[in-house]
Amino acid sequence: MSPARLHRVVVLALVGLLPFELGIPHRIFGRAKDPAGRPLYEILTCALAAGPVRTDADFAIQVEHGPELLATADTVVVPASYELGPVHEEGRLTGELAAALAHIRPGTRLVSICTGGYVLAAAGYLDGRPATTHWASAEHFQRLFPAVRVDPDVLYTDDGDVLTSAGVASGIDLCLHIVRRDHGAVVANDVARRTVVPPHRDGGQAQFVTRPVPQEQRAGTTAARARMLDRLHEPLRLTDLARQEAVSVRTFTRRFREECGLSPGEWITRQRVERARQLLERTDLPMEHVARDAGFGTAQSLRKHVQAVLGVSPTAYRRTFRASRDAPPAPDGPSAGRVRTAPRPRSPTRTAAPPPDGSAPSPSRTPAALRPTGP
């Protein structure tokens, strides 16, 4: 019996690419390891033609593979580029880009970072689906692709086999989400620690948009959130939290939402679900104990909130990731290289704190727009 082929991530490097975003998939997926320290992904880069590819910096990169590599991918990632030409200006693919994307097999998972979403949209992959891009490009993106359900406020969206992220660092959020979706919170949190980034970020893009009037100088809610994380297993009352900050409940709630993009109650629930999923993955504790330690109190409350956020019951979630962790390597065959995943969420992820698990890719829609409309 030979070891299973690694899940292959192919990154498409386009002319004018941003080196930082090109490196995100390699950094995040490349650090994902199983309990024995073995890599979980193989990450390769291709271009429209093998050879040097100009970046938006003062250097080019040498890419060894041409577009044929896309035919071998289990996941394709399209980072941002500032030189998309007709894709960005008219919403259409060039013949060369259409020919490259035609190599992608049906069922391949597609991922975009920032304005890389323009490529997926021009190819028709985002028609009728939720998607996002950098907040500064969101209105233009929606005008150019009216069939896409653009959400300018989120850090990323997950529609099963097609995922998009907002600008720059949200590509890290999305790649961590994919690792978490594929292999669970334990693996994703380890990648985050090794990369020195938070496992998930609260809120959406709204907190990063420049405001026309500077905000008044005031204390934030960072200290309050730290106390809340230390006391998730206890009852947390909004009145007590506001009193500790020496502000009214209304002021505390407003500041909290401005900083996190969520109300205090929503934030606490998400943190408790994250605590529960770690306990489900790492321990054999009975559901009553998981509920108590995560702050839900009862197993019934645990089931209600885990089902609402993750789309599956606590028992099903534990079965998925404990079985995936304990399973021996699979042999080569038709299923080799496919990542075992948890069931897909029923709606696009609104924030990365903590994002719900997704499912194995659903059948890919054949994009009619792969037929180029110009040179």
Image (cartoon, rainbow, N blue to C red):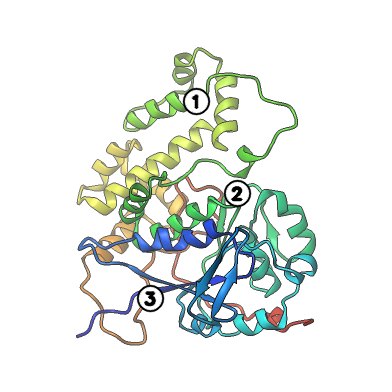
Q: Quadrant of the N terminus?
A: bottom left
At mark 2, the secondary structure is: loop
Question: How many marks do you count on the picture?
Answer: 3
Q: Is residue 299 visible?
A: yes
Q: Please name the amino acid that badge 3 sits on.
A: Arg
Res 338 label:
3
- Residue behind mark 2: 154
- Left or right position of 240 against 187: right
Kindly report the distance in space between the C-alpha atoms of the residues bearing marks 1 and 3. Answer: 42 Å
Task: Establish if 334 lies above or below 35.
Answer: below
Q: Is residue 77 visible?
A: no
Res 194 label:
none
Task: Establish if 16 lies above or below 315.
Answer: below
Query: Which quadrant of the structure image shows residue 3?
Result: bottom left
- Residue behind mark 1: 221
- Left or right position of 173 against 293: right
Q: Nearer the viewer, residue 327 or 58?
A: 58
Task: Establish if 21 lies above or below 195.
Answer: below
